[in-house]
Amino acid sequence: MDTQKVDMFIMANGKFFESHHVMQIRDRLVALDDSKWGMIQTLQFKDPTTSLIVSLLAGSLGIDRFMIGDTGLGIGKLITCGGFGIWAIIDWFMIMGATREKNIAKLQQYL
């Protein structure tokens, strides 16, 4: 794989991943077969900042968890009104990391 393409991909999408994963992602993309590159470029990742904003505004309804694909946790938060507010507050600090972990899992499906 062309390292210039990989570096541009990392620069454009680096905010969607934990910083300690970025170099591992780069190394795996460089070693990737060119036939998979088109599919990798079309992947759409969830924005951690958007997840945080949604969590702050409607976290007690579980919308933040539904948004990142955690349907079970979203239903749990919806039924309990965000764990009576406690779970919603905890997610204010954890939702960005959870979003980035979902993004890395999505990328690893194609690597």
Image (spheres, rainbow, N blue to C red):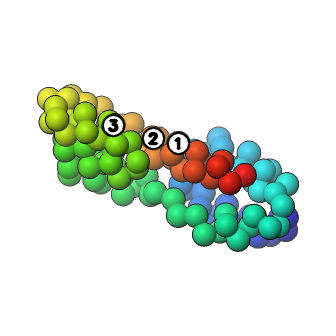
Which of the image's four quarters has the N terminus?
A: bottom right
**Distance from Cα at disc 2 to Cα at disc 1:** 5 Å
Which residue lies under the disc numbered 3? Answer: 72
Report whether residue 73 is seen. yes
Amino acid at circle 1: Glu
Which residue lies under the disc numbered 1? Answer: 101
Left or right, 49 with reference to 33: left
Q: Position of residue 92 (x, y in %)?
A: 31, 40
**Distance from Cα at disc 1 to Cα at disc 3:** 17 Å
Amino acid at circle 2: Ala
Mark 2 neighbour density, 10 Å: few (under 14) some (14–19) many (20 or more):
some
CB of mark 2 within 8 Å of CB of mark 1? Answer: yes
Q: In which quarter of the image is residue 110?
A: bottom right
Query: What mark, if any, has residue 12 been given in the picture?
Result: none
Q: Position of residue 85 (x, y in %)?
A: 16, 32
**Distance from Cα at disc 3 to Cα at disc 2:** 14 Å
User: Circle 2 sits in a helix, a strand or a loop, which is it?
Assistant: helix
Q: Quick check: 100 above or below 93? A: below
User: Circle 3 sits in a helix, a strand or a loop, which is it?
Assistant: helix
Amino acid at circle 3: Gly
Query: What mark, if any, has residue 98 been given in the picture?
Result: 2
Q: Quick check: 106 above or below 43? A: above
CB of mark 1 within 8 Å of CB of mark 3? Answer: no
Residue found at x 66% / y 43%: 21
Q: Quick check: 14 above or below 23? A: below
Left or right, 81 with reference to 46: left
Q: Earlier in the sequence, mark 3 or mark 2?
A: 3
Residue found at x 25% / y 39%: 75
CB of mark 3 within 8 Å of CB of mark 2? Answer: no
Q: Where is residue 35 in the image (x, y as percent from the top left)?
A: 80, 67
Q: Quick check: 102 above or below 11? A: above
